[in-house]
Image (cartoon, rainbow, N blue to C red):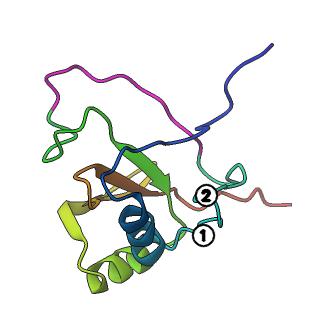
């Protein structure tokens, strides 16, 4: 059966693409290819998600963009510390749920991004 297995890409319009690429490289550690793209292997933990929200949702606020991007991270505290040093705007307070820890930042073009650290995988006793 043919089906989508995860997030295949996130594309953002910007007046200054180089400045936005530089911000993502500096703040979130994106390894940007010479031609401007980032390629990630399928994550070994977590999963890609896709959903449609009601137009009236305030979940993307304070962004006015009609989308939000979620990135899986391996160390939420470490990413947030680096983002703070770089002057990134934290949105709200980080939170913990049974399915992981979350925090939100605004990127330089006003898109709210969600950072997700999935819980450590449970290992079965052998």
Q: Residue at x 22, y 52 (%)?
A: 110
Q: Residue at x 20, y 68 (%)?
A: 89
Label of residue 38 in the image = 2
Viewer-closest of 17 and 104: 17
Q: Is 60 covered by the magenta stretch? A: no
Q: Is 48 covered by the magenta stretch? A: yes
Label of residue 31 in the image = 1
Number of marks drawn: 2
Q: Secondary structure at mark 1?
A: loop
Viewer-closest of 113 and 73: 113
Viewer-closest of 32 and 68: 32
Q: Is residue 43 left or right of residue 108?
A: right
Q: Residue at x 21, y 66 (%)?
A: 90
Single out the residue that lies furthest toward the bottom.
85
Give the extent of the magenta segment: 47-57
Q: Secondary structure at mark 2?
A: loop
Instruction: Give the vertical position of 47 relative to 125 (above or below).
Output: above
């Amino acid at each position: 059966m043919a089906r989508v297995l995860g997030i295949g890409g996130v594309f953002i319009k910007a007046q200054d693409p180089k400045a936005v690429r530089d911000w993502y490289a500096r703040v979130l550690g994106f390894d940007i290819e010479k031609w401007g793209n980032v390629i990630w292997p399928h994550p070994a933990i977590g999963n890609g998600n896709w959903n449609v929200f009601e137009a009236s949702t305030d979940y993307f606020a304070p962004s006015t963009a009609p989308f939000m991007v979620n990135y899986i991270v391996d160390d939420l505290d470490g990413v947030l510390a680096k983002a703070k040093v770089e002057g990134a705007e934290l949105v709200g307070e980080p939170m913990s749920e049974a399915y992981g820890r979350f925090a939100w930042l605004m990127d330089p073009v006003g898109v709210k991004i969600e950072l997700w650290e999935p819980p450590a995988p449970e290992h079965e006793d052998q």
